C-alpha cells in the first residue's frame, strides 16, 4: 500500500523508450511516435542496440550509454529481457517503468525482486501504457491521444482504454490520466486510487475492473478517494458460473459479484453495469455538481418523448418532480393553454426559442425540481440548433441557479440535431442522444449522491453496550474442533449464538426414538407441540431429506416421527452419520416472517454477512443482500432495506410491522461474533423468525476451521480496535476513558468545539471558525482504522469529549501527520501529554517510522511538550510562522537530537 515514486510514473521529467523501433506498426514504433507527438517537454531517450538513429532521433545502444537518468522508462522489449532491464534501470536511478510485454509469467517475481531494492515502480506488464494529457505524456501504443481534462480513467483492460478514448474525444471530454494496469504486478487499483485521490488535476475517477487484488488495500484506498471525489466503476463478470460448492445457504447465495456490490457500496463507490452507463455517468459527473435532491423536471416539445423519459425514470425508481400551483401559474403565463399542466412539461410541438427559454427560466427559478432534463424532437417550425442556442443562453445567464439545479439535454434524432449536440458539448452542457441514456445519466448522479450520503451518515449511539459471553463461545468452538469436527450441530451453533445474546429456541438432543419420546413429554408439559430434527454432521439441509417433522402434539407422535425419519434418511443417505435427534418446542408465531442471517468467506473480500428471505425456498427466492463486517445499526438497517422482504417486514394488511431494530441488532451481533472468532467460516441462521415481538433463531448451522492450521482470509475493513481502550485519571475531571474514536462521537465533537477557544481552534486547524459542517465532522469521526487513528478522551462521569490526538498515515503506512487539541479549560492538567503518549505508543506498535506535524511558532506549550516527547523541530518550509516537529526514533540522532524517554507528568496517573 504505497504511492511512493508514483510521481515519477505520472509526472516524469524525462522518459526513456527501451526497444524503440523504425518498423512501422510495431509496438516500439507506435510508442515512439506517441511520445514524440504528444508534446512532452522533457528529454526523450531512445534505446535500441541495432540503430544509431530512428527518424532523425539519436538512439542509444544500451541503458548504460544514456546521457542522463530517465525518471520513467517504457519497455517495448520482449518479456524475457524485462528482468535484466529493470535491474539495470534501478541501479541507474530510474524510479518508474511501464512494462508493455505480455508473457512475463514466472519471471514476474524476479522482476519485482529486481525493482524492490530501489523501490522502482512498475506499471504492467501486459498493458498498453499510460497517458497524462496535461503534460503531453503519451507512453502508450494507443491509436490516438486523449484530450486533456479532469477525468481519470484506470482500466484493467487495454482494449477498453482505446474505446473510452474514442468515445470521449467525440464528446469533447478530456482526461487527467488514462492508465492501463495490465497484470498489476506492482501498481494496482489501490495505488491508483490513493494517487488520484489527492491529484489536483483529477475531479472524478472512472474504473474498469475485472478483479480486485489485495482487498483490504483496495477498500481503504477506495473509501478515502470516494470521500474526496466521485469514483465510478464498471465491473465485469456479473454472471459468473455460479457460487462455489458450499455447505450453507449463505455460501450458495453469496456469489462473487454480490460481494463486489457490497464492497463498492461500503466504499461509497458508484457501480454501473455497462459501458453505456459508465459513459452516461462520465457525461454528468464531469459537468454537473453534486445534486441537492432527486426530483427531475422533464421539459419537452414532444409528449411521447416526455412520457418515454418518465417511464424510464420510474424504471430506475427515480422521482419525477411535482409542480406546485405557483410554478403552474408561472408557466401558464409563458406557455399556450394546451401545455400539459404537469411534469413532464410538454410545451407543444410548435414551440419556438422563446418558449424554450421562458419555460426553462421558470423551472430554474422554482423550488419544485432538483434538476431539469430538456428534450427536443425535430420539427419544421424551429431548427434544432436554434432550440439548443436558447437553452445554452438561458444556462449561461443563470450560472448560480444551474449549479444548484443542473440542466441536461437530449436532442433526439441524428443528422438534424448534430450541430445542436456540438453546441452543447462546446458549452459543457451535458447532452445525450436518447431518453434512456439521459435518464441513466441523471440517475447515476442520484445514486452517487446516495452513496456519498451513506458513506458519511452518522450512526446513533447504542442505547446500551452489548455484552457478550466471549469465553463461552470460545469454549464451545474449541470443543468442536478438538473433537475433530468442522461442522457444528444446530444445538452447538445455538449455544454460540446464545453467548452473543441472540434469542434461540431451547433444544434437547435425543440419541434414539425412545429418548425422543421422553424429551417430547417434558417439552409438551409447557408447550402445545414440539419439533424433531435429524442431528447429523453430514446433512446440511434437513428439510430436503425429510429430516424435520413439525407440530407434533404427543410424545407418541414424536417417537413415531423419529422412527419414520430414521428409515427415510437411511434409505436416502445410507452413509450419513446420525448423532440422534434434536427435540424442541414448536414455536408458533403465525404472522412471523422467515428470514435468513448468515456469513461466508468470499475469496476476494473475506468474511461477508448476509440477510434475506429465509425458509426452505431460500435459494429459489434469492432475495438477499450482503455487507462487509464490521456493522453498526445504520449499516444493518440498510442491509434489511436492500431486500424485497423488507417491504413485508414494514407491515401489510393485518400483519403488524416486524421489530426491525431486533433484526438490525442481530446482524450487528453476528458481525461481532465473526470478528471475534476467526474459526467461523460459514454460518446459517435459517429461519430467523421475525415479527412485532422480536426475533428467534429456529435453526442454525456453523462450519469451522482451526485458525492456526488454516487462517481465514482477513477482514476487508479493520474493525474497531477496542483493545486500545484505557482509563486514566485527570485531577480536574476524575476518571477519563481514552479510546479510539467512533462514528457516533460526532455529536460530542459539536459540543467540544463550543468549549474550545477560537485561538485553540486556530492553532489546531489554522482557522478561527468553531462550527463545522457534517462532512468535516464525519471525516474526523468515521475513520479507516487501517490507516488512521484518533484517540478521544471521554469524561467517564458525563460522557463529554475532553480532547483528541490524531494520526493520519500515508498510504505506505510508514509515516504520518499528527494533530492534537484539548478543551481550553483543561490546559495544564496533563491531558495533552496522555493523548500524545497514547498516540506515540500506538505508532510504535504499528511500526510507523516517522510522525510529523505543523505547530504555530506562537504555540510554545505544544512545542515544549513535543520536545519533551522526543520530537525534533525545524522551521516549516515556506512559512516562517510555523514549525515542523518530527518524531523519528531512528533518525533523531542524525538530526542532532538525543533520544529522550517519554516522561509521565506527576499530576496524572494511568
Image (cartoon, helix red, strand yellow):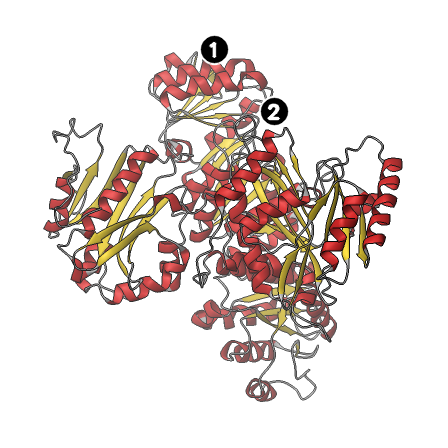
Where is residue 581, by image quadrant? top right
> Is disc 2 placed on a helix, strand or loop?
loop
Residue 25 is marked as 2
Residue position marked by numbered label 1 in the rendering: 49
Query: Is 635 on the left or on the right of 891, as rendered?
Result: right
Can you say whether 645 is above or below 836 in the image? Answer: below
Q: Position of residue 645 (x, y in %)?
A: 69, 61
Quadrant in the picture for the N terminus: top left
Q: Earlier in the sequence, mark 1 or mark 2?
A: 2
Image vertical order of residue 833 relative to residue 335, above or below: above
Residue 432 seen in the figure: no
Q: Is residue 625 above or below residue 674?
A: below
Residue 316 x, y percent position in the rendering: 67, 63
Label 2 crowd bin: few (<14), some (14–19), many (20+), radius 10 Å = few
* Viewer-nearest residue: 817 or 589: 589
Q: Residue at x 39, y 54 (%)?
A: 742
Q: Who is closer to the viewer here, 816 or 189?
A: 816
* Mark 1 closeness class: few <14, some 14–19, many ≥20 residues within 10 Å: some
Q: As drawn, is 331 to the left or to the right of 177?
A: right
Q: Is residue 605 above or below residue 321?
A: above
- Secondary structure category for the residue under label 1: loop
Which of the 4 image quarters holds residue 904?
Answer: top left
Amino acid at each position: 500500500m504505497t504511492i511512493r515514486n508514483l510521481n515519477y510514473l505520472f509526472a516524469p521529467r524525462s522518459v526513456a523508450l527501451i526497444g524503440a523501433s523504425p518498423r512501422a506498426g510495431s509496438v516500439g514504433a507506435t510508442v515512439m511516435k506517441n511520445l514524440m507527438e504528444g508534446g512532452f517537454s522533457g528529454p526523450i531517450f531512445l534505446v535500441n542496440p541495432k540503430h544509431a538513429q530512428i527518424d532523425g532521433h539519436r538512439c542509444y545502444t544500451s541503458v548504460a550509454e544514456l546521457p542522463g537518468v530517465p525518471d520513467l522508462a517504457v519497455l517495448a522489449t520482449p518479456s524475457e529481457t524485462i528482468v535484466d532491464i529493470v535491474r539495470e534501470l534501478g541501479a541507474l536511478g530510474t524510479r518508474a517503468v511501464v512494462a508493455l510485454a505480455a508473457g512475463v509469467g514466472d519471471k514476474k517475481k524476479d522482476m519485482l525482486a529486481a525493482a524492490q531494492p530501489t523501490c522502482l515502480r512498475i506499471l504492467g506488464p501486459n498493458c498498453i501504457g499510460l497517458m497524462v494529457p496535461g503534460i503531453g505524456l503519451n507512453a502508450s501504443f494507443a491509436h490516438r491521444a486523449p484530450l486533456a481534462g479532469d477525468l481519470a480513467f484506470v482500466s484493467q483492460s487495454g482494449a477498453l482504454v482505446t474505446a473510452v478514448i474514442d468515445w470521449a474525444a467525440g464528446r469533447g471530454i478530456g482526461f487527467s490520466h488514462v492508465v492501463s494496469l495490465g497484470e498489476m504486478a506492482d501498481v494496482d487499483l489501490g495505488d491508483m486510487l490513493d494517487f488520484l485521490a489527492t491529484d489536483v488535476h483529477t475531479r472524478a475517477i472512472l474504473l474498469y475492473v475485472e478483479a480486485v487484488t489485495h482487498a483490504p488495500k483496495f477498500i481503504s484506498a477506495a473509501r478515502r478517494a470516494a470521500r474526496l471525489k466521485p469514483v465510478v466503476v464498471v465491473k465485469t463478470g456479473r454472471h459468473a458460473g455460479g457460487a462455489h460448492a458450499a455447505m450453507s445457504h449463505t455460501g450458495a447465495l453469496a456469489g462473487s459479484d454480490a460481494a463486489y456490490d457490497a464492497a463498492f457500496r461500503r466504499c461509497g463507490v458508484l457501480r454501473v453495469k455497462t459501458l453505456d452507463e459508465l459513459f452516461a455517468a462520465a457525461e454528468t459527473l464531469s459537468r454537473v455538481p453534486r445534486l441537492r435532491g432527486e426530483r427531475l423536471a422533464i421539459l419537452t416539445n414532444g409528449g411521447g418523448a416526455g412520457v418515454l423519459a418518465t417511464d424510464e425514470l420510474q424504471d430506475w425508481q427515480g422521482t419525477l418532480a411535482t409542480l406546485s400551483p405557483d410554478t403552474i401559474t408561472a408557466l401558464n403565463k409563458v406557455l399556450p393553454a394546451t401545455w400539459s399542466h404537469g411534469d413532464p412539461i410538454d410545451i407543444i410541438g410548435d414551440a419556438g426559442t422563446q418558449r424554450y427559454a421562458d419555460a426553462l427560466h421558470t423551472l430554474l427559478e422554482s423550488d419544485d425540481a432538483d434538476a431539469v432534463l430538456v428534450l427536443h424532437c425535430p420539427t419544421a417550425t424551429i431548427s434544432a440548433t436554434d432550440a439548443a442556442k436558447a437553452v445554452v443562453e438561458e444556462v449561461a445567464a443563470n450560472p448560480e441557479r444551474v449549479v444548484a439545479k443542473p440542466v441536461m439535454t437530449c436532442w433526439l434524432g441524428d443528422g438534424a440535431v448534430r450541430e445542436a449536440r456540438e453546441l452543447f458539448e462546446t458549452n459543457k452542457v451535458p447532452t445525450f442522444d436518447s431518453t434512456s441514456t439521459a435518464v441513466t445519466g441523471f440517475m447515476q448522479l442520484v445514486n452517487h449522491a446516495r452513496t456519498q450520503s451513506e458513506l458519511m451518515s452518522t450512526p446513533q449511539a447504542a442505547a446500551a453496550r452489548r455484552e457478550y459471553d466471549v469465553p463461552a463461545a470460545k469454549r464451545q468452538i474449541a470443543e468442536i474442533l478438538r473433537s475433530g469436527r468442522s461442522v457444528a450441530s444446530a444445538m452447538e451453533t445455538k449455544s454460540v449464538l446464545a453467548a452473543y445474546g441472540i434469542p434461540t429456541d431451547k433444544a434437547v438432543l435425543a440419541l434414539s426414538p425412545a429418548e425422543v419420546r421422553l424429551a417430547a413429554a417434558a417439552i409438551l408439559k409447557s408447550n402445545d407441540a414440539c419439533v424433531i430434527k435429524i442431528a447429523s454432521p453430514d446433512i446440511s439441509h434437513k428439510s430436503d431429506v425429510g429430516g424435520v417433522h413439525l407440530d407434533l402434539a404427543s410424545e407418541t407422535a414424536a417417537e413415531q416421527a423419529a422412527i419414520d425419519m430414521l428409515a427415510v434418511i437411511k434409505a436416502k443417505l445410507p452413509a450419513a452419520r446420525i448423532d440422534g435427534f434434536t427435540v424442541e418446542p414448536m414455536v408458533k408465531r403465525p404472522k412471523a416472517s422467515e428470514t435468513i442471517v448468515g456469513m461466508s468467506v468470499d475469496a476476494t473480500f473475506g468474511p461477508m454477512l448476509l440477510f434475506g428471505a429465509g425458509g426452505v425456498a431460500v435459494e429459489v427466492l434469492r432475495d438477499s443482500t450482503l455487507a462487509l463486517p464490521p456493522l453498526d445499526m445504520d449499516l444493518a438497517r440498510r442491509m434489511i432495506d436492500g431486500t424485497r422482504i423488507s417491504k413485508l417486514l414494514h407491515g401489510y394488511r393485518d400483519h403488524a410491522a416486524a421489530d426491525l431494530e431486533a433484526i438490525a441488532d442481530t446482524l450487528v451481533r453476528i458481525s461481532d461474533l465473526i470478528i471475534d472468532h476467526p474459526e467461523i467460516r460459514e454460518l446459517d441462521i435459517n429461519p430467523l423468525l421475525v415479527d412485532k415481538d422480536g426475533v428467534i433463531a429456529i435453526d442454525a448451522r456453523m462450519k469451522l476451521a482451526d485458525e492456526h492450521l488454516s487462517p481465514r482470509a482477513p477482514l476487508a475493513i479493520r474493525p474497531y480496535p477496542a483493545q486500545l481502550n484505557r482509563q486514566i485519571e485527570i485531577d480536574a475531571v476524575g476518571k477519563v476513558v481514552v479510546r479510539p474514536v467512533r462514528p457516533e462521537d460526532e455529536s460530542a465533537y459539536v459540543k467540544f468545539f463550543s468549549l474550545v477557544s477560537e485561538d485553540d481552534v486556530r492553532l489546531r486547524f489554522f482557522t478561527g471558525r468553531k462550527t463545522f459542517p457534517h462532512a468535516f465532522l464525519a471525516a474526523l469521526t468515521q475513520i479507516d482504522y487501517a490507516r488512521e487513528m484518533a484517540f478521544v478522551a471521554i469524561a467517564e462521569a458525563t460522557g463529554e469529549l475532553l480532547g483528541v490526538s490524531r494520526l493520519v498515515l500515508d498510504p505506505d503506512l510508514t509515516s504520518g501527520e499528527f494533530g492534537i487539541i484539548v478543551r481550553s479549560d483543561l490546559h495544564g492538567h496533563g491531558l495533552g501529554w496522555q493523548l500524545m503518549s497514547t498516540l506515540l505508543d500506538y505508532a510504535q506498535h504499528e511500526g510507523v517510522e516517522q510522525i510529523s506535524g505543523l505547530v504555530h511558532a506562537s504555540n510554545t506549550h505544544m512545542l515544549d511538550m513535543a520536545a519533551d516527547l522526543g520530537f525534533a523541530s525545524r522551521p516549516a518550509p515556506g512559512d516562517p510562522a510555523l514549525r515542523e516537529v518530527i518524531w523519528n526514533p531512528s533518525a533523531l540522532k542524525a538530526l542532532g537530537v538525543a533520544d529522550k524517554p517519554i516522561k509521565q507528568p506527576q499530576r496524572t496517573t494511568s
